[in-house]
Each structure stands twice: as C-alpha cells, then as structure tokens.
C-alpha cells in the first residue's frame, strides 16, 4: 500500500478523533448549562435573627464559579493531552527519514488541518450557544497548534529535504 495514502488516512482519522474531543466537550459543557447557576440562590436565610442571605448567596456564587473553573480546566487539560498524544503518535508512526513526501501531500495536510480546525470551531459554536465562544476557543485551539507544530512542519521539512536530495543527485 502507498505510504502517502496511509499517511493521509491516518491524518483524517486523527483529525476526526480531535474533533470528537473538542466538539464533544463543547456539547458536554452546553448540556451542563454552565452559564446558569449550578446551585440555586437562597431567598431568606435568618440565623438567630440575623440575615445571612447575602453571605450565603456570595458563597453559592463562589462555589458555582469554582466548579465551572474546575470543569472547564479539566476538559481543556484532557483535550490538550489527547490531541498532543494523537499528534505525536501520528508523527512518530508516519514520517520516516527515508520516506519521500510529495508536494500534494504537504498541501493536503495543511488544508485538512486548517479546514478541520475551523470546522471544529464552527461546529462547537453551532452545537452550543454563542455565549460559550470563549469555551469553544479554549477547547479548539489545541488541534491547529499541535498538528501544525508536531506533524505538518516535520512533514514539510521532509519534503524539502527530499527535494534537496533530488536536486543534488541531478
């Protein structure tokens, strides 16, 4: 089987897996409705004749904020780790020193990473609320960054080296 074809199929597969993490967590955040209060505010808290409603509601707001921070932080961390692992595995398993890389493969890779990243961002916005744009950005920046740094740039360098070797042999 052609190595270029295998690399393209694996790149599409890794991009799909990246989508699952990015868009899946965005949908999960939307389903949790993190914009709404997770704990309902108190109406009237009186202890020994003193009004503790404000203090209680302040505590509830703090717990809601901390919970949102923990959930979003863990989702971003997990997404980053898995996309990083997928990019490294793709790089290690597909780009070898003696492999020849064509210009069409380099162009395809760049376009697929860009289109996949933009599509993941748009799908995240469409599947969630526009108010969650910051969360969508937080869960979709990893794919273009890591795929470009870890996979595309070494692939492009391999193409350039192959072209330099071909020119030096002529």
Image (tube, rainbow, N blue to C red):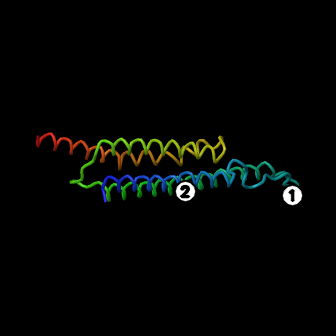
Residue, x 47% and y 42% (percent of image)?
Answer: 115
Does residue 131 appear left or right of residue 150 in this picture? Answer: right
**Crowding at label 2, few (<14), some or many (≥20) Cα neighbours within 10 Å?**
few
Between marks 2 and 1, how big is the CA–CA gap? 41 Å
Does residue 33 appear left or right of residue 88 in this picture? Answer: right
Q: Which mark is residue 30?
A: none
Q: In this view of the protein, which residue sits in the foreground, 122 or 168?
A: 168
Q: Which residue is mark 2?
A: 74
Query: Residue extending furthest right?
Result: 49
Q: In this view of the protein, which residue sits in the foreground, 63 or 51?
A: 63
Q: In this view of the protein, which residue sits in the foreground, 159 or 24?
A: 159
Residue 133: image location, x then y, percent? 60, 41
Q: Secondary structure at mark 1?
A: loop
User: How many numbered marks are there?
Assistant: 2
Residue 11: image location, x then y, percent? 40, 53
Residue, x 30% and y 47% (percent of image)?
Answer: 155
The image quadrant where one finds the C terminus is top left
Q: In this view of the protein, which residue sits in the foreground, 134 or 96?
A: 96
The image quadrant where one finds the N terminus is bottom left
**Crowding at label 1, few (<14), some or many (≥20) Cα neighbours within 10 Å?**
few
Residues at badges 2 and 1 in contact (C-beta under 8 Å)?
no
Q: Quadrant of residue 107?
A: top left
Q: Which residue is mark 1?
A: 48
Residue 77: image location, x then y, percent? 50, 55
Does residue 140 appear left or right of residue 128 in this picture? Answer: left
Residue, x 69% and y 51% (percent of image)?
Answer: 33
Vertical placement of 35 versus 20: above or below?
Answer: above
Does residue 138 appear left or right of residue 130 in this picture? Answer: left
Q: Secondary structure at mark 2?
A: helix
Residue, x 53% and y 46% (percent of image)?
Answer: 120
Please tell me which of labels 2 and 1 falls first in the chain.
Answer: 1
């Amino acid at each position: 089987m052609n190595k270029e074809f295998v690399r393209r199929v694996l790149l599409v597969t890794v991009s799909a897996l990246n989508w699952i993490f990015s868009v899946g967590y965005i949908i999960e955040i939307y389903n949790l409705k993190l914009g709404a209060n997770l704990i309902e505010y108190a109406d009237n808290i009186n202890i020994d004749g003193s009004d503790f409603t404000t203090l209680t509601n302040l505590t509830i707001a703090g717990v809601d904020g901390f919970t949102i921070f923990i959930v979003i932080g863990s989702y971003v961390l997990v997404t980053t780790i898995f996309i990083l692992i997928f990019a490294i595995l793709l790089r290690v398993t597909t780009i070898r020193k003696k492999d020849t890389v064509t210009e069409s493969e380099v162009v395809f890779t760049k376009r697929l990473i860009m289109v996949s990243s933009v599509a993941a961002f748009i799908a995240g916005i469409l599947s969630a609320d526009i108010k969650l744009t910051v969360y969508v950005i937080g869960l979709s920046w990893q794919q273009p960054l890591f795929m470009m740094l870890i996979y595309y740039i070494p692939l492009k360098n391999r193409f350039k080296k192959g072209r330099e070797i071909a020119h030096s042999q002529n």
